[in-house]
């Protein structure tokens, strides 16, 4: 979180730098109120733009953090001569919130965090409001009982030493909890192993060589062919990260039959002529995707793979309104068919969870009176993928390609498979939808046909 290049660190550094500059210089020195009013109004405008522009998908903090930070600095710099400052911001209610602002900052975050832990998903507005309300009361009590008495009056050395010791106790307790990764003795073995298991996907996805990031181009593809067989037949895996997570499964289950060629890129579906390079949100900006897919199409015509597997997070493109992706996916498959590729497989969407699978399992474990960790579970499933199953299966039918329904492979009336064993590495997915290596091997082993 506090890496030098972290957006949070940059935001914090910017705020501290502006605060130091204001402290050193003081408010704007001018004999007229015009400059003060313009400065204050500019600050309010920047804050308003930030509030109206930020959405759930916006990368924040980051460059967007400049708006509220700089806006606040301008308001402070304007001083008491600015009309907004002396009339609006001097309102007793706003002043009161200013007095409790720091303890409010300290209280609101743990309460919101606990609300999310209890719910297992991002809490509703009602629950968030219910968490903020007591945070305001606790902030006022902290200010009145602790902060204000400490700010004024005289204090003995004994009081200072006691506060120092208490701070040391809290610090040692926090460090002990951090080093011990919480208090694992409270939970059964399976929960402990699940809680402490960390899946490192970069090697299994073959990041930067076979699974490229937005700033990388097709020229970055390297060493992406598995040569475990003497067969001349190859299988080309094409898509985004939801294709990359199938690689280990294909390598394990089909590596003796095919040379596996992986051509995958983050948020770049295997769809020709789909322009996703200028999305409003910088997190979705993929300027190289269209050219990369054209490169892959040319490559596969030279390679002539015996089998082409198309896979992507189709639910994401459906929910985020990626234009005519469905029509263009069908056209892409037809282009492959016309180019002589008869064995084209379209893999449907993987079942998705409302939060990471582990968090959903933990929430179920807490709610279940017998404290079970189910192998199958419908609790916490995000059923938005069900609609995409129908969409993609229809595309496969109309284009004449084979369709593999991960929904049918992993789910039934009792829910979807969550794990294939009793240890942390047995989870099917390591986040809300990406398969682990074990999950990939299990899923691909269930693929019908050759």
Image (cartoon, rainbow, N blue to C red):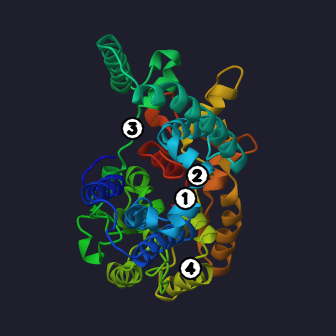
Does the residue at mark 3 contact the one at mark 1 (Cβ under 8 Å)? no
Query: Marks 3 and 1: which is nearer the front?
Result: 1
Instruction: Using the numbered discs, state the Cα–Cα distance from disc 3 to disc 4 in whole angstroms.
Output: 35 Å
The residue lying at 52 percent from left, 83 percent from top is 332
**Picture disc at residue 198:** 3
Which mark's residue is nearer the viewer, 4 or 2? Answer: 2
- Residue 246 placement (x, y as % from top left): 45, 56
Mark 1 and mark 2 lie on one chain; the one further toward the N terminus is: 1
| Label 4, residues with CA under 10 Å away: few <14, some 14-19, many ≥20 | many
Please name which of the two marks, 3 or 2, marks the residue nearer to the observer: 2
Of mark 4 and mark 2, the one earlier in the sequence is 2
Circle 2 — which element?
A: helix
In the visual, does 444 lie left or right of 367? left
Q: Name the residue under label 4.
A: 329
Labels 1 & 2 near each other (Cβ < 8 A): yes
Residue ID for mark 1: 89
The residue carrying mark 2 is 94
Sequence-wise first label, 3 or 4:
3
Q: Left or right? Give the position of 223 relative to 426.
A: left
Rounded to the nearest angstrom, the CA distance separating label 3 from label 1 is: 47 Å
SS of the residue under disc 3: loop
Classify residue 87 by image quadrant.
bottom right
Cα distance between the residues tagged 3 and 2: 45 Å
Identified at 62% across, 49% down, the residue is 93
**Residue at 38% across, 80% down:** 287
**Counting residues from the N terminus, which is met first, the one under dot 4 or under dot 1?**
1
């Amino acid at each position: 979180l506090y890496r030098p290049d972290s957006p949070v660190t940059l935001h914090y550094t910017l705020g501290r730098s502006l605060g130091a500059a204001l402290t050193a210089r003081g408010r704007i020195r001018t004999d007229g109120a015009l400059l003060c009013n313009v400065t204050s109004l500019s600050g309010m405008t920047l804050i308003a733009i930030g509030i109206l522009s930020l959405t759930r998908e916006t990368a924040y903090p980051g460059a967007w953090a400049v708006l509220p930070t700089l806006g606040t600095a301008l308001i402070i710099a304007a001083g008491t001569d600015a009309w907004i400052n002396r009339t609006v911001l001097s309102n007793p209610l706003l002043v009161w919130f200013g007095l409790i602002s720091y303890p409010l900052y300290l209280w609101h975050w743990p309460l919101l965090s606990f609300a999310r832990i209890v719910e297992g998903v991002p809490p509703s507005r009602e629950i968030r409001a219910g968490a903020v309300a007591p945070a305001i009361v606790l902030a006022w009590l902290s200010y009145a009982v602790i902060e204000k008495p400490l700010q004024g009056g005289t204090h003995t050395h004994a009081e200072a030493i006691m506060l120092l010791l208490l701070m040391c106790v809290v610090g040692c307790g926090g460090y002990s909890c951090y080093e011990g990764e919480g208090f694992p003795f409270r939970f059964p073995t399976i929960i402990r192993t699940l809680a402490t298991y960390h899946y490192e996907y970069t090697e299994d996805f073959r990041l930067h060589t076979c699974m490229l990031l937005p700033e990388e181009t097709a020229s970055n593809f390297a060493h992406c062919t598995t040569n475990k067989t003497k067969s001349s037949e190859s299988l080309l895996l094409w898509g985004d990260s939801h294709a990359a997570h199938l690689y280990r499964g294909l390598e394990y289950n089909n590596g003796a039959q095919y040379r596996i060629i992986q051509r995958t890129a983050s948020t770049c579906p295997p769809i020709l002529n789909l322009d996703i390079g200028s999305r409003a949100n910088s997190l979705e900006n993929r300027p190289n995707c269209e050219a990369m897919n054209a490169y892959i199409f040319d490559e596969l015509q030279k390679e002539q793979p015996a089998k082409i597997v198309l896979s992507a997070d189709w639910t994401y493109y459906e929910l985020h309104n990626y234009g005519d992706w469905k029509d263009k996916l069908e056209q892409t498959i037809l282009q492959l068919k016309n180019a002589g590729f008869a064995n084209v497989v379209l893999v449907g969407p993987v079942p998705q969870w409302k939060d990471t699978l582990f968090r959903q399992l933990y929430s179920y474990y807490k709610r279940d009176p017998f404290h079970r960790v189910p192998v199958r579970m419908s609790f916490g499933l995000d059923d938005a993928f069900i609609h995409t199953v129908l969409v993609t299966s229809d595309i496969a039918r109309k284009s004449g390609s084979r369709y593999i329904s991960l929904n049918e492979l992993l789910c039934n009336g009792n829910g979807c498979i969550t794990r294939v064993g009793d240890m942390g590495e047995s989870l099917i997915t390591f986040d809300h939808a990406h398969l682990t290596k074990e999950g990939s091997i299990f899923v691909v082993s269930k693929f019908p046909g050759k």
